[in-house]
Image (spheres, grey):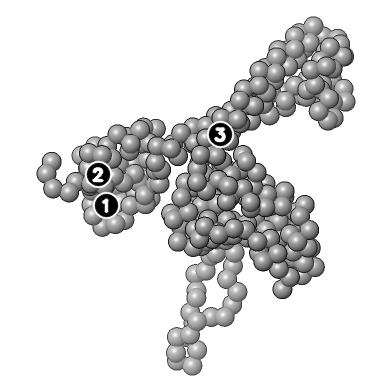
Amino acid sequence: MSGNVALVFEEGTHSAWLYQLLKPLVSTVTVCDPRHNKLIEDGNKSDDEDALALAQLLRLGAVKAVYKGAQQQQQLKELCRTYDNLVADTTRVQNRLKAIYRGRGLDCVGHALYRADQREDWLAKLSDGAARFRAASLLDQLTALTALRKQAKQQLVKQARQHPDYAQLLMLPGLGAVRVAQLLAIVGTPQRFRTKRQFWPYCGFAVCTRSSADYQIAAGQIVKQRKKVATRGLNRNHHPRLKQVFKGAALTALRQAPIKAWYERQLARGAKAEMARLSLARKLAAITLTLWQRREDFDLNKAFAAN
């Protein structure tokens, strides 16, 4: 095909591979979110009809693009998925292991159950041979997963350290090596977002509002009502891992005195504890985006100065 060829296709299992494969062959490649392509559902449906509808939506600028990073970010994403999966598998095995002892009325509070030097003592508490075999197999799984999890963490941090913004993000409160690596894998570049107003919805921190009557007629003129806008919680369409990164960073950052003082001021003003922590997570997300875009170092006293 001659001329400037613009290619568009929907997000799916092969979208990342197709994006890297077809990007050098055309002028532009757009991977769009199928949930926003409601016009495709009208009328007849076929491969040809869907392709025509996608082309028309692209021409009108009505498709919502899904960000696809460079090859280096794709590698970081794979390592991040590997680490997250191993963490989830480790937690699942630990929960199954404790369920065996709780189901038999045995106290297993804490992490002593997972220690290798106390393995025989915990297995001896189970009188049932089948339960003892199951617990032993789960402990073997836990040992293997712990070793794999450590290796995945090392590879993830090693890959993240090659990013030029790693050292700068590491200075932010609550962001350790793993959270910075996850942030780099998910966001890639801060230039994707113009301001914090676009970044908050991606993190799941945007407040949803609902209003069906913003204006009224007063004295023969149309005026805007002054009633308070009704809120409906936070947006649901977001990246859950990124939300966990900033919520976890907020809990870790509370150990620092200026941030803890800021948190206590929010509580003194009447805010609930969970809302104060949410405000802290939103503030950390906004600070991260701003400093990342400007390539500036973090100043704790300036960011959390007493007002």
Residue 137 placement, left or right of 52: right
Q: Identity of the amino acid at label 1?
A: Leu
Task: Answer whether residue 244 is visible to the viewer in this image.
Answer: no
Residue 187 higher or lower than 154, as above or below: below
Which badge, 2 or 1, comes first in the chain's sequence? 2
CA gap, disc 1 and disc 3? 39 Å
Q: Residue at x 72, y 48 (%)?
A: 252
Q: Quadrant of the C terminus?
A: bottom right
| Rendering coords of residue 36 (x, y %) | 38, 50
Q: Identity of the amino acid at label 2?
A: Leu
Residue 285 placement, left or right of 70: right
Query: Which residue is identified by label 3?
Result: 158
Q: Residues within 10 Å of mark 2 (few under 14, many from 20)?
A: some
Residue 220 higher or lower than 70, as above or below: below
Pointer 2 and pointer 1: residues touching (CB < 8 Å)? Answer: no
Mark carried by residue 170: none
CA gap, disc 2 and disc 1? 9 Å
Label 1 sits on a secondary structure element that is helix
Residue 61 higher or lower than 77, as above or below: below
| Rendering coords of residue 182 (x, y %) | 56, 41
Query: Which residue is identified by label 1?
Result: 58
Label 2 sits on a secondary structure element that is strand
Q: Quadrant of the N terminus?
A: top left
Which badge, 1 or 3, comes first in the chain's sequence? 1
Which residue extends farthest left? Answer: 2
Pointer 1 and pointer 3: residues touching (CB < 8 Å)? Answer: no
Q: Identity of the amino acid at label 3?
A: Lys
| Rendering coords of residue 126 (x, y %) | 84, 13
Query: Which residue is identified by label 2?
Result: 7
Q: Residue at x 75, y 9 (%)?
A: 133
